[in-house]
Amino acid sequence: MQSIARDLKRAKSATAEVYVPPYPGGHPVPYLRVKWNQQSLPITYEECAKRLREGEPRIEVNAARDEITLASYLMNPGEERIVGLRLAEVLEQATA
């Protein structure tokens, strides 16, 4: 998740936060919360998720009204780079 957060520094208006949800009795699994100022990055969270889903490679994220979250437990080693670079690319394209 930290690797993806570093890749997102390319998208200047985006912020990324690694967190572990407080599930009582559950296994601590890191997630990444991604947010941006929609005036600086004119793309909705739903549209970003759609572009990731329809792109190559296909990437699934959880899109809410005010953020995108990614779960680490579904990724294999090395896939974090693919996800980070692709997400940064989608956000950068939104400003072009």
Image (cartoon, rainbow, N blue to C red):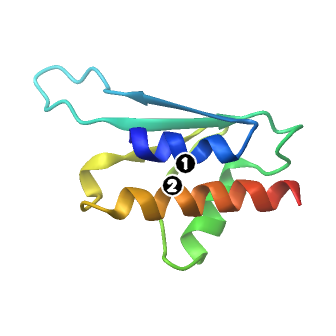
Q: Is residue 90 above or below residue 21?
A: below
Which image quadrant: the C terminus? bottom right
- Which residue is at 49% across, 54% downward? 61
Query: Can residue 80 be seen in this snapshot?
Result: yes
List the single residue furthest toward the bottom.
56
Q: Is residue 83 above or below residue 44?
A: below
Q: Is residue 34 above or below residue 43?
A: above
Q: Secondary structure at mark 1?
A: helix
The quarter holding residue 37 reads top right
Badge 2 is on which residue? 84
Q: Residues within 10 Å of mark 1 (few under 14, many from 20)?
A: many
Front residue of 64 and 48: 48
Along the polypeptide, which appears first: circle 1 or circle 2?
1
- Which residue is at 55% across, 60% downward? 85
CA gap, disc 1 and disc 2: 5 Å
- Which residue is at 25% across, 60% downward? 77
Locate residue 50, reporting x and y percent.
63, 65
Front residue of 66 and 86: 86
Q: Is residue 53 left or right of residue 66?
A: left
**Number of labelled discs?**
2
Badge 1 is on which residue? 7
Tell me whether the residue at label 1 lies in contact with that at label 2, contact meaning CB atoms closer than 8 angstroms.
yes
Q: Is residue 10 left or right of residue 81?
A: right
Q: Secondary structure at mark 2?
A: helix
Locate residue 1, reporting x and y percent.
38, 42
Locate residue 64, reporting x and y percent.
59, 41
Q: Amino acid at mark 1?
A: Asp
Q: Amino acid at mark 2?
A: Gly
